[in-house]
Amino acid sequence: MQMGRYAKIIDNIDWGLLLSTMCILVIGLLCLYSATRVATTILFWKQLIWIGIGLLVMLMAFFVDYRFLLPLTWPIYLAVLLLLVIVFFLRPEISGARRWLSLGPIGVQPSELAKIMTVILVAYWGEQKKHILNFGLRELVQPFVILSIPVLLVLIEPDLGTAGIITLIAVSMLVLLGIKRSTLLSAGAFLVIALPFGWLSLKGYQRLRILSFLDPSRDPLGSGYHAMQSKIAVGSGSLIGKGFLDGTQTQLKFLPEHHTDFIFSVVAEEWGFVGSLILIVLFMLLITKIFSIGLKAKDRFGTLLCFGIAIYFSLHVFINIAMAIGIFPVVGVPLPFISYGGSFMLVNLFCIGLVLNISWRRFIF
């Protein structure tokens, strides 16, 4: 009887999703090793540890019924808010920002947890309001106010990229739920009116990043340096790349943040167009798999969780690669499973475990 239960679990796992995730993880480790080996390999070994912890988190997310998140939604929301507030008091500034909490020898970035919290919260809200077909302004006031709090806290850190990701996840999920045309038009008009005020509220270095995106040559040794060096690395990779460990922009440290925000440039320089295309195809397979599982989920909550997670991955992949090739401002958005980062890795693998859970449980409802 017990063996039959385990056989059923194995038979109903979405192996395509799991395999694409593992392939991307391996590529990420190879890229990180190449990006960090000249200075130190400690980040590589730390990432291995984070992946090990993340795989345990993924297993937990797989075996615990995802519907248990419904009653935990508000406690999760409050816990993330608390962490976002604590970070201002218990952590000194690093490079002008307060984003990390120290838990012994490890650091945790609460803003990364805010992204998956947003997915869970909007999915919960959509489940509670499933009797409404199209949402108007009146119905959207509550989620707008609730979600604006973590967005503002992340902006104050400051972390424009993460705040933007949280906002885009929420907006995209709400649009998928269904919004009245008049409401969309009103929101669009409000956004246009608010743009000048948003520009004035940006910090000086954030404005400079946007101006340098429009014209990197205006400050080639300052705010435009990252983008210009990244484009040089990507372009120099040509068709098949310079070879593993042989990327000059990476190995000679011309490319800044090559283990985090600009790690795609390492892929492009060492593995060329072919290697970059393979990685992009793997991400596309991963994201389409998640969407497909969402369409087959047995309940609205599971569907919305999958859609939110697919949007989460899509935004990170698009923005990170767009930054690397110079068609998007540098806003500090990492590449899933590839960029170095403990909190980010844990959230990514938790998301995969959650989707595997939703896929598997449609066979046992």
Image (spheres, rainbow, N blue to C red):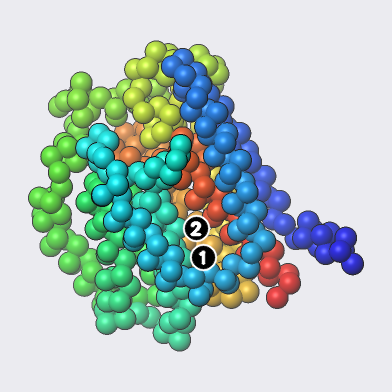
For the C terminus, give its image quadrant. Answer: bottom right
Disc 2 designates what residue? 309
Q: Which residue is mark 1?
A: 305
Crowd rating for badge 1 (residues with CA inside 10 Å; few <14, some 14–19, many 20+)? many
Residue 146 visible? The answer is yes
Q: Is residue 330 above or below residue 145?
A: above
Q: Residue at x 34, y 17 (%)?
A: 254
User: Is 350 rendered above or below residue 234?
Assistant: below
What residue is drawn where x is 24% and y is 58%?
A: 152
- Could you tell me which residue is drawn at 38 percent across and 51 percent down? 110
| Residue 252 relative to residue 356: left or right | left
Mark 2: secondary structure: helix
- Pointers 1 and 2 in contact (C-beta within 8 Å): yes
Q: For residue 61, what is the image quadrant?
A: bottom right
Q: How many marks?
A: 2
**In the picture provided, is 74 more to the left or to the right than 28?**
left
